[in-house]
Image (tube, rainbow, N blue to C red):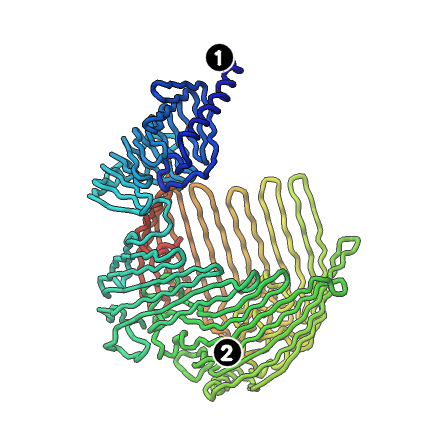
Amino acid sequence: MRSHRQAGLARLYGATALACLFVCAVPAVPALAQTITAKPVPSGTQMLLAADTLIYDNDKHTVTAVGGVQIDYGGNKLVAQRVVYNRDTKRLVASGAVELINSDGTKINSDHIDITDDFADGFVNALRVETIEKAYFAAESAERMGGVLTTFHNGIYTACEPCEDKPDSAPTWRVKARKIIWNGEKKTVRFENANFEFFGFPLAYLPAFEIADPTVKRKSGFLIPGIVYNNHLGVGVKVPYYFALSPTYDLTVTGTGYTKQGFLGEAEWRQRFNNGEYSLKIAGINQQDPDAFIGTGNRYTVDSGEPDDPNKFRGMMGTKGQFAINERWNFGWDVLLQTDKNFSRTYNIEGYNELVHQSSIYLTGLSDRNYFDVRAMRFEVQEDTLSSDPTARSAKQPWVLPSFDYAYIPDMPVAGGQLSLNVNARVISRDRLDSVLADSGDPTSINNVRGLEGQSSRLTAEAEWKRTFTTDGGLQLTPLLAFRGDAGYSSETAGSLAAVNQMAANLGEDVDMRSSLARYMATLGLEARWPLLFSTPNSSHVLEPTAQIFVRPNEQYVGGLAVPNEDAQSFVFDATTLFERDKFSGYDRIEGGTRANVGFRYSGAYENGWGTNAIFGQSYQLGGENSFDAPDLVNVGAYSGLQTAKSDYVGLIGFNSPSGFSGSLSGRFDEQSFEVRRAEIKAAYSGLPVSLSAKYAFIQAQPLYGFTTDRHEVTLGASTHLAESWRVFGTGTYDLETSVLVKDGVGFAYNDSCFTYVMTFSQTRDTVTKEVSQNIGFNLSFRTLGDFGSSTSAVDTIQ
C-alpha cells in the first residue's frame, strides 16, 4: 500500500505527465462531450488532472489513469474511476461511475463513455443527461455525431426532478420514445415512436413529434392549443402559431373557432429595444350568430346601433409601449380602438378585457425628491348596454387632454422643516351629459350631475411646510402652513345647464355656474401627538393620543353649484382618513373652515407573535362653513358623516397571529345614536391544509349621492390542500339587499415542479336582470413542453 506521501507524489507526477501528453496530443478543441453546442476551449488552456495511479503503455500507445480520476479542462469536468487515452485512435474512454459536467452546466452520468479526442463524436451506454435547465434524458445507449447531433436509443425525456424519497418512481410526466434526436444546431428535440406517460400510465401514442430544445426560449412553431367556453360564444378551440423572426421581435398568430360565433383571428406583434418595448395586437370576427347576444349590447355594431344590422363584423386594435428615455424619464402608451365598446371583453382579448380600460399616452419623470407626470387619457367602459342607451356609461366618459402632476421636495430643510410643492392641471372634454335620476320614471328629476357636457379645465398649485418639535416629555408638536391657488375655466352646453338647474330645483339651491374662476385656500395647522409606551413581561403597547386643528377660510364657490366636480367624487370618511388635512379625494373640492380631528392610534406586540392595532376618533367643525354640508354637483358630502358640526365616530380594530389568523373590524357610527352607518368585517386564516377568508360590507343608503338603498354584501372564499400538490378552492359574493348571488366559482388545481393543472367554473349575475354569464377555464402547463387550456384571465377569475 502506498503511503500518503507516495500517493500525493504519484498524483502530482501523474497529473503533470498526463496533462503534458493531452496538451500535446489534443489541440485546442470544443468542450468535453457538449450535448448542446460545441464551444471551443481557448488556445493554451491547461488541463488539470488528479488520479491515484498513472500507467504508461508504450507498446499500445495508451495512457491510463486509475482511481479517483478528476479532469478539469476549459471549464469541463470529468470524474471517473478509470480513464484510458489511446494516441492511435484518438479516443478517450472513461468507465466506472462517470460524471461529465460541461461548461454550460449540462451533466452526463454513465457507467461507460467513449468519445473522440475532439469530444464531438461519441458513444455512451446506460446514459443519463441533466441539462442546466433541469431537463432530463435517459437512454440504454446514445451516440453523438458532428458535435451537434445526439441520438438516444430507447430513451426517456422529462422535466420533472427525481423524487428524493423514491428516486426510482415514475415522474409526474415523461415521454418514452424508441429514438430521441437532439439537434444542437437546429435547437430541436424530435421523438419517434413515442408514448406520453402521466404518473406512470400511458396516455397517448405519438408516431413522431418535435419540440424546442430545452435551452431555447424562442422558436417558431405551433404553441399548444387551448380550449375556452362562454355561454354566449359556445366552446372554442384556440390554436396559436409563434414566429420567432429575430432576437428582438416576434409575431404570434392565433385562430379560434367558436361553435356559436365562428372564427376569431388574432395577431400580436412584439418588439424589444435597448431602452424599451412595444406591442401591437389586432383581432376580428365575422359573427355567425349575433342574436346569441339578445338582451345585451354585443349584437350591435358601433356604427348603426340598430338591431339586425347586416354588418356582423367586430374587431379591435390595441397597442402598448414603454421606453426609458434615460434613468429618470419614461415614455409610454396604452391605446385601444374597437368597433364597439364591448368586443375585447366579450371575446376575452388578453390585455384588453378589463371592465374599464384606460387608454393613455404618458411621459413620467422620477428622481429622489421630484415627480413629473403628464398624460392624455380616455376611459372606456366595456358594458352590454347600447351606446345610444341613456344609461350607457361608456358614452359619458370624458377625454382627459391632458392631466399633469408635479411634486417637488427640496433637499435642504427650510426654516428647519420640510417644504413640499405640488402642481396639478387637467383639461376634460365630454360629449354627453352624465347625470343620475332621482326618479327613474321622471327624466327631469336630476339627483346629481357627475359630468358636464362640454369642456372644463383647472390649474392648481400648492405649497406646504411643516416641522416637528419633541418635548422632554415625549410630546410631538407639528406646526403646519399651507397655501393653495386654483384657476379654472368651463364651457358647458345648454343641456348641461338645464340639468344643473333641475338638480338645483330638487335641492332648493341657487345656481351660480361660472365660466371662469380663481380661488385660494390658506391653512394654519397644528398637530399634537403623545406616544405612550406600556410594557409587560410578555408584551409591549404604544398608545398615541392625537389632536389636530386646521384654521382656514371658507371654501369658495360652494353652495351655488358653481364648480364642476370631476376628480373628487369618490369620498369615504373612515379611520384611515380621520387625520387627513384635506379629506376630499381630489383637487376639485377644498376642505374649508376651522376643523379639529381628535382620536388615538394603538399598536401592540406580544411575545407569542400576536399583534393588535386600532384607531378611533371624531372630527369637529369649529368655525366657518362646513364644506361637507355644502352641496356640489355630485353631493359628495351628503351622508358622509362629516356634514354635521360633530362628525360620526370612526374606528378600526385589527389583529394578526403567527398561526395564520387575522381579522379587522372597521366602521362609522352615528355621532348621537351610535347607529352603524358603514361597516366592514374581515376575517382570514392562512395555513395548511386550509385557507379561509370572509368579508362583510354594509353601507347605509345615500339617496342624494346616488345610492337609494342600503348595500349589504358578503364574500366568502376557501382553499384546501387535499394532498401535497392538490388544492380545491372556491369563492362567492352574495348581495343581501337584492338577494342575488352576484358571482361564484369553484376550482381545483395541481402543482409540482414540472406540471400545473388548474380548472375553474365561475358565474356572474346581473343584480337587476338576473342574467347569468358562465365561464369555464382550465390550464395545463408541462414545463419545457408548453401550456394548454384557456387564457390566464379566464382561470384567474376566482383565484
Q: Considering only vertical position in the picture, is 486 above or below 536? A: below
- Where residue 94 appears, as percent x and y from the top left, is 36, 26
- Seen from the viewer's position, the closer of residues 705 and 284 is 284
- Seen from the viewer's position, the closer of residues 264 and 695 is 264
Instruction: Name which residue type carries label 2.
Output: Ile
- Please tell me in which quadrant of the rendered image residue 315 appears: bottom left
Q: Nearer the viewer, mark 2 or mark 1?
A: 1
Does residue 585 appear in this view?
yes
- Where residue 394 appears, as percent x and y from the top left, is 40, 74
Q: Tag 1: Cα neighbours inside 10 Å, few (<14), some, or many (≥20)?
A: few
- Please tell me in which quadrant of the rendered image residue 619 appears: bottom right
What residue is drawn where x is 33% and y is 26%?
88
Q: Considering only vertical position in the picture, is 556 above or below 528? A: below
- Please tell me in which quadrant of the rendered image residue 336 appears: bottom left
Q: Which mark is residue 428?
A: 2
Does residue 672 appear in this view?
no
- Where residue 241 appears, as percent x and y from the top left, is 29, 57
Q: Considering only vertical position in the picture, is 518 above or below 234? A: below
Asked if marks 2 and 1 touch (Cβ < 8 Å), the reply is no
Of the image marks 2 and 1, the number of the one nearer the N terminus: 1
Instruction: Name which residue type carries label 1.
Output: Arg
User: Which residue is identified by label 1?
Assistant: 2
- Seen from the viewer's position, the closer of residues 36 and 530 is 36
